[in-house]
Amino acid sequence: MKLTEAVIRSLRVAKVFRENSDRINCFDFAANGESMISSSEDDSIVLFDCQEGKPKRTLYSKKYGVDLIRYTHAANTVVYSSNKIDDTIRYLSLHDNKYIRYFPGHTKKVVALCMSPVDDTFISASLDKTIRLWDLRSPNCQGLMYLQGRPVCSFDPEGLIFAAGLNSEMIKLYDLRSFDKGPFATFRLQQDRTCDWTGLKISNDGKYILIATNGGLLRLVDAFQGNPLQTLTGHMNNKGITLEASFTPDSQFVMTGESNILMQACNKDPHKTMTTLSLLEYWEA
């Protein structure tokens, strides 16, 4: 199905799942689109069947907690960050609910975790002011960057470049093959002192960078020149929580959430004013 403004405006809530007793902090879709997985502050990991539209299995990480859960390239394994005991990243087999490997190194909360779109490499960013490069096949850190502030990070769609957002005011682009030589491009943006950057995504067409915050705005940036293109405002975030924001697969729309609204979809065309196209509202009784 081709996504158009009319299709986005026609979206409605079809099902509501009440599998969790606390806030869902992350979810991710498998590459084949057949399953989805969520992590929650109640230490649960819920696997959903997207074809049948129902939860399939629930696992728990009571000892370590779970956040930033991500599918690897195998649909039966995931990596996730810990929010109890330590800040180790864990590699879990969903088939038998056993850990395959641990990735220790970060000394404070992990705030970004991203799998490479092409291989077993992944990157993580932490409040310890480091970005680490990993390979699923080894528990040892493959690369380490010391930074001057809170980082966020993400791969480009081809897995050749990664972007690092620093101090909520600067984006640096690195070639994965020579990141130790420093960034090949640096973009400095005007800092908004009312919020912090909490996420960064590069669109599938490679043209745009989307910055999520813990405030009431998102920022769209040209990935080649670093020019600010749009600022999306209007969604509520009075609690200052980290809200997920993503591009649609065709890179034409941006989606985010807010308090009591499951999804807010917007046209991200830089030649138009970014406007809300659809609000999917759900209020607990």
Image (cartoon, rainbow, N blue to C red):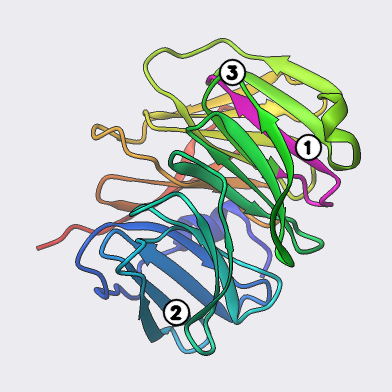
Crowding at dot 1, Cα within 10 Å, few <14 / some 14-19 / many 20+, comes out as: some
Which label sits in the foreground, 3 or 2?
Answer: 3
Amino acid type of disc 3? Gln
The quadrant where residue 280 appears:
bottom left
Is residue 144 positioned above or below 222 on the image?
A: below
Which label sits in the foreground, 1 or 3?
Answer: 3
Identify the residue shown where x is 52% and y is 26%.
Answer: 150
Left or right of residue 224: residue 169: left
Amino acid type of disc 1? Lys
Pick the front one: 245 or 40: 40
Label 2 residue SS: strand
Identify the residue shown where x is 78% and y is 51%.
Answer: 157
Is residue 272 positioned above or below 132 on the image?
A: above
Specify which label sits upstream in the sequence, 1 or 3: 3
Instruction: Give the residues drawn in magenta, as a range.
Output: 155-167
The quadrant where residue 145 appears:
top right
Specify which label sits upstream in the sequence, 1 or 2: 2
Circles 1, 2 touching at the beta carbon (< 8 Å):
no
Q: CA distance from mark 1 to mark 3?
A: 27 Å
Is residue 238 positioned above or below 18 on the image?
A: above
Circles 1, 3 touching at the beta carbon (< 8 Å):
no
Figure quadrant of the N terminus: bottom right
Q: CA distance from mark 3 to mark 2?
A: 37 Å
Identify the residue shown where x is 24% and y is 35%.
Answer: 239
Which label sits in the foreground, 1 or 2?
Answer: 2
Task: Return the residue at label 3.
Answer: 148
Residue 258, position as x, y percentages in the image: 33, 44
Label 1 residue SS: loop
Q: Is residue 271 visible?
A: no
Figure quadrant of the C terminus: bottom left
Task: Return the residue at label 1.
Answer: 207
Pick the front one: 262 or 200: 200
